[in-house]
Image (spheres, rainbow, N blue to C red):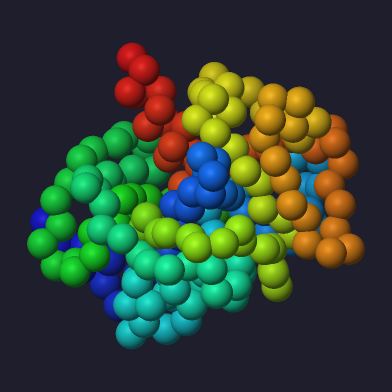
Amino acid sequence: MRLSDWITPTTPAGTALFLMWNGYHVFSIPHRELVRSPHSVRFSGVGGKRSSCTESFVDCAWREGVEEIGTVITSIDSASQTHLFRADGSLTAISLVDEAISPRLVLEKQNHTGHGSLSVSDPSYYLVAFDASLNAPPTPRNELAALIYMQDAHLALMQDGTEWAIADLLQRDARIECQAGVSLAPATTLIPHGTAKFLVHWLHERSC
């Protein structure tokens, strides 16, 4: 299968990173989430849209990573397996033949909220997400309000669709780092989105 077969140069697309630090998944909370709904925010992998239709997905992942968490990424790594996560919730293992670095995830997004960079009327958006390595703790910068650190056990709590409050997760050893001047109320609930939603789904399938 070729990624270019369904993600053409004109297809809205971007990237995200699967990051780990000291046994924790590292997710981001963009500032726009606090504007959209400050009491219930989405969290996902660090990343964003391609700057142009000619920007490669790996280059986009590097650029977005540096912009959002600084120069702490040492490599973008090939995944042992690529998954296609469709908008209908179906999850399929696929093999890509046209990518030098294999992404862990290709995610299809539909029904856009209009609060991000996509309008409600935009067509499907594809997120290409890669594993990456860090050599130091990341720091939320620019459009990121905060980084949240979670383990598999925290994500497993969300498998039934329950929205957990930040305070409850912190009591269970999750961690959060806000950008200077930003604060999130302890009662703020968190919704897995993008790579986080994939991991919640993937962990559930593995446990069945």
Out of 152 and 94, give the one closest to the viewer.
152
Residue 118 x/y as whole percent: 55, 65
Q: Residue at x 61, y 67 (%)?
A: 69
Nearer-the-camera pick, 129 or 120 = 129
Number of callouts:
0
Position of 5 with respect to 115 (left or right) is: left
x then y, percent, for residue 192: 57, 39
Quadrant of the image occupied by residue 155: top right
| Residue 156 seen anywhere in this rendered image of the structure | yes
Against 63, residue 145 (above or below) is: above
69 left or right of 109 in image:
right
207 to 133, vertically: above or below: above
Quadrant in the picture for the C terminus? top left
Q: Residue at x 56, y 62 (%)?
A: 136
Residue in the image at 33% along x and 43% along y: 85
Q: In the image, what residue occupies the spot 61% across and 58% down? A: 137
Q: Position of residue 28 (x, y in %)?
A: 62, 54
Q: Is residue 41 left or right of residue 193?
A: right
- Residue farthest along the top direction in this orientation: 208
- From this viewpoint, is residue 14 visible? no
189 sits left or right of 133 in the view = right
- Residue 189 is drawn in which quadrant? top right
The N terminus: image quadrant: bottom left
Q: Position of residue 29 (x, y in %)?
A: 67, 53
